[in-house]
């Protein structure tokens, strides 16, 4: 075993690290956007009861909100129940057979975002729901619109609650991206497997892979701790 | 049809509110002149809080109309009747009415200063220094200016409620609504909050107050309304109503309240 070899392996794996990071970051952003939007709809869209005093326009709004929640729940049940590998294969190979060829990066981000969005929808929803209804009422009472109350009062407070599961999700996602090597996306695992088939240095290469993933996820965990401490301002 | 007098501030006209089968309010008519203080008393579940919450549309009335300074609240008149307002319009109306809740409902992620100032900055578009100057002024009024940098959860219930009152005052409201402002407080903290409300009442601000503090209602309110099973069972000048109740249910209720004290 010589240092030169290890250096070569490490450099090769590092080429994949950029791809791993970009998939993680882009997927995280999309998953958060999906989760935030759907979570807010699930938390607040169910309000409003159908009664005879509603105008036609109000009825339409209530019905479309209820339909939206119904569809969101179907989406969550489907994507929570599928392994990411299956989703990626469907998007990459399945769609290719149907005539839509996606780039590995696009397929990876799309698939993982849909899965992540399903998880995060309920994370955000429960975060919003955990805020006492009086918080929102007080915001409305001083003249904020429902959206203003959400932005200024609910979101900053639910942030404290959603941060730990959000950080867990981010770290989990970073590791989960290893599956996208299966659709030939040139990330860490992809390079690792190529190296192994060429050199058969299995243990050293996968040790390096482990070290690399740890080096990426550890700072993420530290960063999350720091955000959490900052978010705790004003607590008893 | 209601008739408006020159100095009518708030007019509640045949207000009904039901939740499904449950009729909570069964036709409330009430008038408040500017500067007048009205106390709503009555047993738990009688609808007095619901009535108060309907005034700033935290509850949407099932039927009936509410007018503030002659303007319809929460509804727009249309060719064929009335239509609910948009959330934006509602928000603008609520900005002119101060509300103090039983549970204070201060925002724990903001310090005291920002709890008071945020609505002025975000809703009224007031410049920050101007909003903070106003905040200083209203906090002074409730004797809490020295706690401006503190966070709500580190303060006592009485202090939190006084800050909630300051927050409502910063709206420069035409009308202040108090929804059982001392019911969530430890007994020894009730006095400080009542004193604060008393001081505001003396400034001539119109108030609608839901309370279980009968002695306080007698002292501060001009008019007392006894709500029972969703209707006004008796009303009149505060001292008459509390010292010489005619309604038998009111007599029983007052008896129970005095026994408790």
Image (spheres, coloured by chain):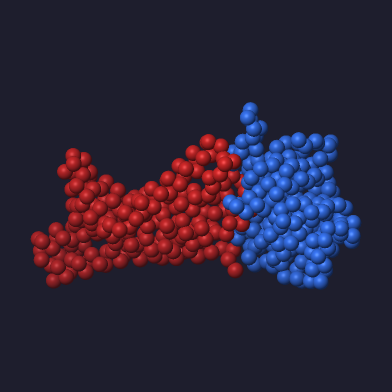
Chain colours: A red, B blue
Residue B62 or B78: which is nearer the viewer? B62
Q: Quadrant of residue A10?
A: bottom left
Residue B3 or B59: which is nearer the viewer? B3
- Figure disc tally: 0
Instruction: Kindly identify the residue that appears in the image at 76 percent across and 35 percent down.
Output: B1
Q: Where residue A101 appears, x then y in whole percent? A: 20, 42
Question: If the image is split into quadrants, where does the C terminus of chain A sit?
Answer: bottom right
Q: Is residue B250 left or right of residue A35?
A: right
Do we see residue B259 in this rendering?
Answer: yes
Q: Tell me: residue B65, above or below residue A210.
A: above
Residue B143 or A79: which is nearer the viewer? A79
Instruction: Kindly identify the residue that appears in the image at 64 percent across and 58 percent down.
Output: B105
Q: Where residue A171 appears, x then y in whole percent? A: 35, 62
Q: Is residue B41 left or right of residue B75?
A: right
Q: Where residue A87 appears, x then y in whole percent? A: 25, 53
Do we see residue A11 in this rendering?
Answer: no
Instruction: Kindly identify the residue that appears in the image at 76 percent across and 42 percent down.
Output: B11
Question: If the image is split into quadrants, where does the N terminus of chain A sit?
Answer: bottom left
Q: Where residue B113 appears, x then y in whole percent? A: 67, 56
Q: Is residue B88 left or right of residue B7?
A: left
Instruction: Kindly identify the residue that appears in the image at 47 percent across and 59 percent down.
Output: A126
């Amino acid at each position: 075993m010589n240092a030169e070899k290890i250096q070569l392996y490490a450099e090769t794996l590092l080429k994949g690290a950029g791809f791993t990071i970009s998939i993680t970051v882009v997927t995280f952003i999309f998953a958060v956007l999906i989760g935030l939007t759907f979570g807010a709809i699930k938390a607040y869209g169910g309000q409003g009861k159908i009664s005879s005093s509603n105008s036609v326009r109000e009825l339409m709004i209530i019905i479309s909100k209820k339909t939206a929640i119904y569809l969101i729940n179907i989406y969550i049940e489907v994507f929570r129940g599928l392994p990411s590998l299956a989703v990626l294969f469907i998007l990459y190979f399945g769609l290719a057979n149907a005539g839509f060829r996606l780039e590995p990066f696009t397929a990876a981000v799309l698939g993982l975002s849909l899965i992540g969005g399903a998880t995060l929808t309920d994370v955000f929803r429960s975060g919003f729901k955990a805020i006492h209804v009086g918080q929102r009422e007080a915001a409305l009472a001083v003249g904020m619109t429902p959206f203003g109350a959400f932005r200024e009062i609910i979101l900053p407070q639910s942030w404290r609650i959603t941060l730990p599961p959000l950080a867990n999700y981010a770290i989990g996602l970073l590791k989960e991206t290893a599956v996208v090597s299966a659709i030939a996306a040139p990330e860490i695992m992809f390079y690792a497997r190529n190296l192994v088939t060429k050199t058969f240095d299995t243990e050293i290469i996968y040790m390096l892979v482990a070290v690399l993933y740890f080096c990426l996820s550890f700072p993420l965990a530290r960063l999350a701790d720091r955000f959490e401490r900052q978010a705790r301002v004003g607590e008893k | 049809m209601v008739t408006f007098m020159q100095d009518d501030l708030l007019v509640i006209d045949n207000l009904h509110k039901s939740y499904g089968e449950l009729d909570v309010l069964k036709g409330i008519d009430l008038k408040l002149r500017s500067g007048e203080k009205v106390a709503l008393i009555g047993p738990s579940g009688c609808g007095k809080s619901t009535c108060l919450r309907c005034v700033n549309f935290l509850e949407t009335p099932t039927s009936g109309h509410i007018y503030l300074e002659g303007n319809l609240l929460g509804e727009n008149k249309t060719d064929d009747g009335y239509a609910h307002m948009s959330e934006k319009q509602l928000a603008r109306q609520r900005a002119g009415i101060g509300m103090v809740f039983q549970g204070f409902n201060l925002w724990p992620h903001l310090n005291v200063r920002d709890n008071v100032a945020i609505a002025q900055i975000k809703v009224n578009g007031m410049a920050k220094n101007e909003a903070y100057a106003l905040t200083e002024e209203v906090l002074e009024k409730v004797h809490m200016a020295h706690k401006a940098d503190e966070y709500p959860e580190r303060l006592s219930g009485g202090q939190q409620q006084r800050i909630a009152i300051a927050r409502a005052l910063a709206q420069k409201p035409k009308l202040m609504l108090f929804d059982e402002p001392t019911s969530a407080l430890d007994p020894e903290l009730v006095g400080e909050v009542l004193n604060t409300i008393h001081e505001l009442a003396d400034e001539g601000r119109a108030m609608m107050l839901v309370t279980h503090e009968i002695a306080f209602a007698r002292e501060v309110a001009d008019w007392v309304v006894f709500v029972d099973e969703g209707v006004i069972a008796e009303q009149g000048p505060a001292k008459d109503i509390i010292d010489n109740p005619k309604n038998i249910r009111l007599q029983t209720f007052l008896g129970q309240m005095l026994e408790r004290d």
